Amino acid sequence: MSNYHVKTLEEYFQLYRKSVRNPELFWEEIAEEHFVWRKKWDTVLEYDFSKPEFKWFEGAKLNITENCIDRHIHIRGDKTAILFEPNNPDEEAEHISYKELHKRVCKFANVLKEQGIKKGDRVCIYLPMIPELAISILACARIGAVHSVVFAGFSSTALATRINDCEAKMVITSDGSYRGAKTIDLKSIVDEALESCSSIETVLVAKRIHSDIELKEGRDKWLQPLLEEAYQDCVPEIMDAEDPLFILYTSGSTGSPKGMLHTTAGYMVYTAYTFKNVFNYKENDIYWCTADIGWITGHSYIVYGPLANGATTVMFEGVPSYPDFGRFWEIVEKHKITQFYTAPTAIRALAKENLDFVDSHDLSSLKVLGTVGEPINEEAWHWYNDNVGKKKNPIVDTWWQTETGGIMISPLPYLTPTKPTYATLPLPGIQLALIDENGKEIKGNQVDGRLCVKYPWPSMARSIWGNHQRYKETYFSAYDNMYFTGDGALRDEVGYYRITGRVDDVIIVSGHNLGTAPIEDSVNEHPAVAESAIVGFPHDVKGNALYGYVILKETGEERNQDNLRKEINQIITEHIGPIAKLDKIQFVEGLPKTRSGKIMRRILRKIAHNELDNLGDVSTLLNPEVVQNIIKERL
Ligand code: WT7
């Protein structure tokens, strides 16, 4: 029995027990057999929850790109590593072989070096889903630079905040991007962001839409000519196991976005292992994850996990609705996709459209379907299962987070019997706990509580960039000796987990994690706004949408409410991005507050959910009278 590929359900249970009995041995055997190391580790794991500090494979030396590229060249050099499917279906798909990927990553790495990037420097990548995105990530890893990818749908303010937080020296971007029928002028967003960023020395610009843009003298450089001239081999920087690999920002319930710091060896081992098992990956598969690489899903399961296994990973530049709602299924048919991994919000959007969009395509190549990002509702699960999977493909509902680095709870396809809306069982090595209001672990089944992890795993984030204290407070202070996920979950009679959602003020909209506090800050910037509170409410495509309650300043003037709504959403778009726009904005006289002045979000949430007969205890409110008015005028 090899630890690396679980082949029966029986074996899963055995391995799971082994991974709990002796986690270090369990991970050591996997690390020994399936990766290339320049030097093996001295210790598998050292940890201290109170600091908190976690060190996996200390003493080991490696370069992750040797594992993702070099080692494959001799055995599968001509195999496609990255299959790029452009936005426009008439443009030809690009097959980048492992050999070719090696060359392109090395050239890019040499360009980074020539531009003064050294080991440990932060490089911000703000690119659309084009091959340069994956290649630039790998080029950073090749030379030991720390990449910080910012999703290219984020605004200039969001980009600037992230650049400044990690003091990046370089931005890699493109002239623009294609998104369905639209083109987006990325470079001007970068220009705007850089007005408030002093750490950036160089901007490398890839040509994608061939628009007429201006390069700022001394700062901006076209990428392609530099690549052409660069040498095609680059000796990998030898990294320590715990050297930083990347920073990726995620929102929290309060404060600025958190730069989750991931390190090298543990992240590599865990993403490779989980990719292999969760997708039951086999050598000739064509795997497609529809996420953007700007999110952790793309980092772990478009780039690192698949490439570490020598897989063919598809990168799709476009959107599911262009040129029509059959695009996903057209691509599945065209490239004979075997594993398809997407988000519930995409499934719900496509389920609204005519079934012919699905039925007119041959989906028989599919073997495994996956979902991630938010709880999948039963209806969407069945639609996916019936129409895409034709009831023969297992659906892996994978629960994890930016912070966890890799998938934590998921069925193993063809092994774990699935159950709609349940992420089912923890993967080997993942020790979960449900905690009650008093901070005590709830044992047994048919219970629910706050989801925690009580033993370290290799791909866990090691810190928040520049703020270890916040890392400690956010994840390790709620309960002793545990990682707190922020999610609630229930465990059914057989021990299956179902994630019930966030227990804090983070709202998942279309699979994107949005903290309410930063959105409220944006709303409050409107000169007419005195105060605001934002809650989520159910939305049949996005999962949740945002409902804002806004108090206006008293000026005596009449203001046009629709214009105000537009202006408020405009500010949100500028500060955060269009994903954070409010679907409903209700202007109110007051917000329900506790005696200590805290907004009672529970009540606002109930009103937004239209659960009016069950508002709960309002007796502790300072101003119970505002509640009836808010209800009367609810949208
Ligand atoms: C939050 C993490 C992990 C990549 C995408 C999101 C929610 C994620 C599931 C799932 C129920 C899920 C959780 C989690 N979530 N996957 N399968 N079932 N909820 O990464 O932005 O860090 O968000 O997404 O609430 O805490 P993220």
Image: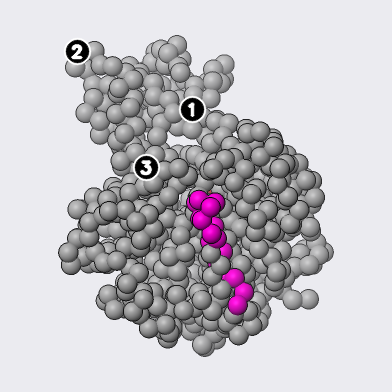
The residue at the point 53 percent across, 82 percent down is 70
Q: Is residue 548 visible?
A: yes
Work out how far the residue at label 3 is from the one at label 2, CA to CA, in angstroms. 32 Å
Q: Nearer the viewer, residue 160 or 431?
A: 160
Against 456, residue 160 (above or below) is: above
| Residue type highlighted by circle 1 | Arg
Q: Are marks 3 and 2 in contact (CB under 8 Å)?
A: no
Work out how far the residue at label 3 is from the one at label 1, CA to CA, in angstroms. 23 Å
Q: Which of disc 1 and disc 3 is earlier in sequence?
A: 3
| Residue type highlighted by circle 3 | Gly
The residue at the point 69 percent across, 36 percent down is 355
| Residue type highlighted by circle 2 | Gly
Residue 181 relative to residue 419: left or right:
left
Q: Nearer the viewer, residue 62 or 172?
A: 172
Q: Nearer the viewer, residue 337 or 15?
A: 337
The residue at the point 43 percent across, 65 percent down is 132
Residue 598 in picture, x, y percent from top left: 37, 31
**Which image quadrant for residue 77?**
bottom right
Residue 310 in picture, x, y percent from top left: 61, 73
Work out how far the residue at label 2 is from the one at label 1, CA to CA, in angstroms. 30 Å
According to the picture, the residue beneath numbered tag 3 turns out to be 577
**Which image quadrant for residue 117?**
bottom left
According to the picture, the residue beneath numbered tag 2 turns out to be 556
Crowdedness of circle 1 by 10 Å Cα count: few (<14), some, many (20+)?
some
Q: Is residue 89 magenta?
A: yes
Question: Is label 1's Cβ within 8 Å of ligand 1?
Answer: no
Against 434, residue 51 (above or below) is: below
Q: Is residue 351 magenta?
A: no
Q: Magenta residues, as a range?
A: 78-93
According to the picture, the residue beneath numbered tag 1 turns out to be 605
Q: Nearer the viewer, residue 18 or 9?
A: 9
